[in-house]
Image (spheres, rainbow, N blue to C red):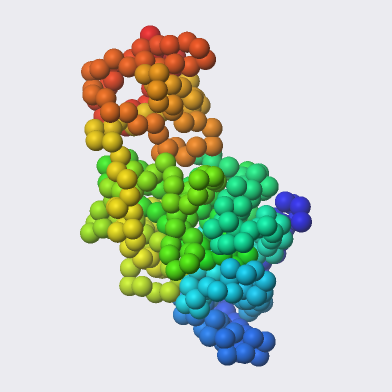
């Protein structure tokens, strides 16, 4: 299906919303079509729905989502072995956060089925999807996006998304082929440097993490943010790490773009991250730009550490153990310039201002 047809489908799905809801009709039809498990799955979806979804989503939208989720469960070998409670919470749902509701399974299933055709395990399937889907749909990291919580079709229309939009895409793509996936992230790193979002994947009884559109050939549980995540504070909600949940947990997933919204449930998973390798003591984070308001540059700091640019997340920064007042070399395009390290944990340098 072309991108334009996909966008039209998204609009069609949105137009199928109607006030009043058809929740009970959905549950009844689910039982008729899929038996007792269909009824159980339908009621699970209903019990976890935000109030706005209960009032607006139509039966046809909900049934199509259920049909395709159950189809994927039978089609892919890794999905058949997923525990029932994990399937219900992390494959079946039609949304992750508060993004626009749309029928993404139609779009992602054929594309992802092709990407995972040689995969033998859940992890292999996730790696294949993360490596291929973003190039396939032509969406990459860009702060020029309109909203952090874009739905897949909204990101595809723009050709850009930031970490949350990219994570929503990866989670939806994985779920379309029966891989349990959920959005994870923190509202604010412990050093108050900003927020971040990524994806978690369930395989063999354990949860793993991966950055969306940040494929690492070495496997899962790798990423530029592992050092930051290791410093998360479990007892402070804003500095903790949360995973989204369709099932009500009594806690909320903190959405920084709509921080008062308490309709998306969350699970505090900080303990799994603080055991990871810690960042170097006294590290300072660096970004280098061509000019203020310009683009990031890939440069080399002190002949050893490279800065990030392009589609790398804005918080994916080079780290160096340096002190304020020290002189540091910055090399770009074969030319080396010098700078005195300013005060601060995060430092933005501008090439056109360096000596």
Where is residue 233 drawn, in percent x and y? 25, 53
Q: Is residue 332 above or below residue 189?
A: above
Q: Is residue 107 visible?
A: no
Within the image, what quadrant is residue 20 found in? Answer: bottom right
Residue 116 sits in quarter: bottom right
Q: Looking at the picture, tell me which residue is in the foreground, 271 or 146.
A: 271
Q: Residue at x 50, y 30 (%)?
A: 309
User: Residue placed at 63% from the left, 65% from the top?
Assistant: 177
Residue at image x 67%, y 48%?
137
Q: Is residue 150 left or right of residue 275?
A: right
- Residue 111 location, x and y as percent? 70, 56
The quadrant in which the N terminus is found is bottom right
Task: Identify which residue, 315 or 62, lies in the foreground.
Answer: 315
Quadrant for the C terminus in the image: top left
Residue 345 at x, y percent in the picture:
28, 32
On the question of residue 206 being in view, the answer is yes
């Amino acid at each position: 299906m072309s991108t334009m047809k996909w966008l039209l489908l998204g609009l069609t799905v949105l137009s199928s919303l109607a006030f009043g809801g058809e929740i009970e009709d959905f549950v009844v039809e689910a039982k008729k079509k899929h038996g007792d498990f269909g009824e159980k799955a339908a009621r699970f979806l209903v019990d976890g729905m935000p109030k706005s979804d209960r009032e607006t989503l139509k039966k046809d939208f909900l049934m199509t989502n259920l049909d395709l989720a159950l189809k994927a469960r039978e089609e892919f070998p890794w999905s058949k072995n997923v525990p029932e409670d994990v399937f219900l919470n992390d494959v079946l749902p039609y949304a992750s956060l508060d993004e626009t509701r749309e029928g993404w399974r139609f779009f992602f299933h054929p594309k992802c089925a092709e990407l995972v055709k040689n995969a033998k395990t859940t992890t292999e399937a996730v790696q294949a999807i993360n490596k291929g889907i973003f190039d396939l749909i032509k969406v990459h990291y860009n702060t020029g996006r309109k909203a952090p919580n874009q739905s897949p079709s909204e990101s595809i229309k723009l050709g850009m998304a930031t970490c949350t939009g990219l994570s929503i895409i990866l989670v939806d793509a994985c779920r379309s082929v029966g891989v349990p996936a959920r959005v994870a992230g923190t509202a604010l790193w412990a050093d108050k440097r900003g927020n971040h979002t990524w994806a978690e994947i369930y395989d063999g009884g354990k949860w793993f993490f991966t950055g969306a559109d940040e494929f690492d050939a070495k496997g899962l549980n790798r990423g530029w943010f592992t050092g930051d995540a290791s410093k998360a504070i479990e007892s402070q909600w804003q500095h903790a790490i949360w995973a989204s949940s369709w099932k009500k947990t009594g806690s909320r997933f903190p959405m920084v773009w709509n921080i008062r919204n308490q309709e998306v449930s969350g699970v505090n998973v900080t303990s799994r991250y603080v055991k990871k390798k810690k960042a170097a003591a006294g590290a300072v984070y660096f970004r280098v730009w061509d000019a203020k308001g310009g683009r990031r540059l890939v440069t080399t700091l002190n002949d050893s550490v490279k800065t990030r640019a392009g589609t790398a997340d804005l918080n994916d920064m080079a780290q160096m153990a340096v002190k304020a007042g020290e002189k540091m070399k910055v090399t770009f395009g074969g030319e080396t310039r010098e700078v005195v390290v300013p005060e601060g944990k995060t430092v933005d340098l501008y090439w056109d201002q360096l000596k």
